[in-house]
Image: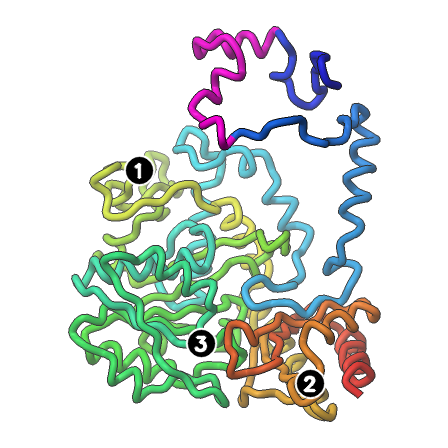
Amino acid sequence: MSGKQFVHPYIPNSEPAVKQQMLDAIGMTSVEDIYQGIPEHLRFKGEMQLPDPIISEYSCQRHVEGLLNQNRNAKNNICFLGGGTWNHYVPSVVETIMERDEFLTCYVGDAYTDHGKFQALFESSSMLGDLTGFEACNTPTYDWANAIAIACRMTARANQRTEILVAGNMSPDRLMVVRNYCKPEITVTKIGYDKNTGLMDLDDLKAKLSDKTSAVYFENPVYTGSLESQAAAICAAAKSAGAYSIVGVDPTSLGILEAPAAYGADYAVGEIQPLGLHMSYGGGIGGFICTKDDKEFVGEFPSLLFGLCETQQEGEYGFGEVFYERTSYASREKGKDFIGTTTALHGIAAAVYMALMGPQGFKELGEGILKRVAYTKKKLSEIPGIKIPVSGCSYCDFLVDFTETGKTVAEINKALLDYNVLGGKYMGGEFPEYGQSALYSVTEVHTVEDLDTLIGALKKICA
C-alpha cells in the first residue's frame, strides 16, 4: 500500500477531505506536524511489516474470530481460576437490561441524560447495603483494589492518622494498588497471619496498633482460602485503638456469612464482578464501598452517592445526588479526593443480578458453593502427594499444595489442558511459604461431573 492514499472503510477520518478538515481546524499542514514534539532518536525508522488491511467486513470478522478461537477459555474448558475474578453464572436478563440504550449510552452525565440510571444506581447501592448491613454505598469504583485505597484515604481524613494496617495474606495485587494510592502521606504495614489456618495473628495486630493507626484492613473470605473467624475480634481491637475497621468481602458470600456491620466493621469494600458480570480478559470488574449513613463517613466519599428526593408530583419518588458539593465534580481542585470515569454501568448490572437473586437466592448460592468446595477439598486431599495447606472452611477459593507430588503447578496446569481443564493460579511466587500451591476456585457453575473430571485428572497426573 506504500505510496498510495488509502481510505480505510472502518476509519472515517482516513478520507483525504476529512483529514484535511481536521488539520485545518488545528492549524497544521500535515499529520507529521502533530508528532514534532517527539525527539528524532525515539522515532521508528523504516516501514512496519504489517499485513495489508482486510477490506471485507465479513473476511475481517472471520480472521479475528479465527485468532480468538486459538484461546483456551472458560466456555470450552472447565475453569477453576479465581482469586479476584470468578466464573459465576450470568443470567441472560442481566445483559438484556444492561445493554438497553438508556443505560448503555447515558455514560456519567447529569439529570438531563438520566432515563432511569439514577434509580438503578440507587437500587444497586441499596441492595449492596442490605448485603453488608450498612446504609450508604457509592457508585462503583474501578475495582476492589481501588475501593480499598479510597476507603483507606477516607479513614485517614476522618481521624487525621497516617498508618493503615493490612492483613499480610491479602491479595498482593490489591496491596500494591493500596500502597501506591496512599503514598506518600499514608504508610501501609502488614500484619502477620497463621500459615496453617490463614487467620490474622491477633497478637501481632495488637502490638502494631498505635495512635497513628487510621484503619485495619482484612479480607473475609481470606484471599488464601479460609474464612476469618476472628472478624469481630479484629474490629474490636481496631476500635479500642481509635481506628476504623475495613473488611474486604465477596458479596456473594453474604447470603451465608454474617454481614460486616453486624460484627462491628466500619467499612465494607469488595468486588461486584460476581454479581452478574462476565469474566472478560480479567475485566468486567468494579469496586464498592459501604459505610454507616453518618456524616463522619458520608462526608469523606469522593464518589457519587444517589438517594431519594422529593418531587412536585405527590406519591412519586425522585432520585438524585446526595451531598454533591463534597465531590471533585462540584469542588474541582478543592475536592478531598478525586475520581474519574467509574464503572457505573457495571453497578446497574449488579442491581439486576441482586434483584433477581433476592435473599433466598443468595442463601442457596452460598450453600451450594460451600458444599461443592468441601466435596472438592475432601476428594483432592485423598490423592497421594496432594495437600490442602490451609485448614477450616473455604468459600470459592482454596489452596491446593502439589509440592509432595514432585511436580510444579505449571507442569500440572499444562497436563490438565489435555482434559480440557484450566487449573488453579500459582501462588508460590506471592506466598513462597506455600511452595508449589495453586489457588483453585469452585462456584455454582461447576457440576459434580466437572469436579470429578478435575479429581480424576489430578489422580492420573500426580500418580
Residue drawn at (34%, 82%) of the image = 232
Residue depicted at 64% across the width and 89% down the height? 387
Residue on which the image places disc 2: 375
Chain part drawn in magenta = 17-42
Question: Badge 1, how many Cα within 10 Å: few under 14, some, many 20+?
Answer: some
Q: Position of residue 266 (x, y in %)?
A: 30, 69
Q: Is residue 374 left or right of residue 37?
A: right
Q: Upstream in the sequence, badge 3 or badge 1?
A: 3
* Nearer to us in this view, 392 or 408: 408
Q: Is residue 109 above or below residue 292?
A: above
Query: Is 57 covered by the magenta stretch?
Result: no
State the image coordinates of residue 234 (x, y, percent, origin top left). 32, 81
Q: Amino acid at mark 3?
A: Asn
Tell me if 29 is positioned left or right of 247 in this view. right
The dot on residue 169 is 3
Q: Which is nearer the eye, 7 or 167?
A: 7
For residue 416, above or below residue 332? below
- Residue at label 1? 329
In the picture, measured across the screen, residue 132 lies left or right of residue 253, that is left
Neighbor class of circle 2 (other Cα within 10 Å; few <14, some 14-19, many 20+) is some
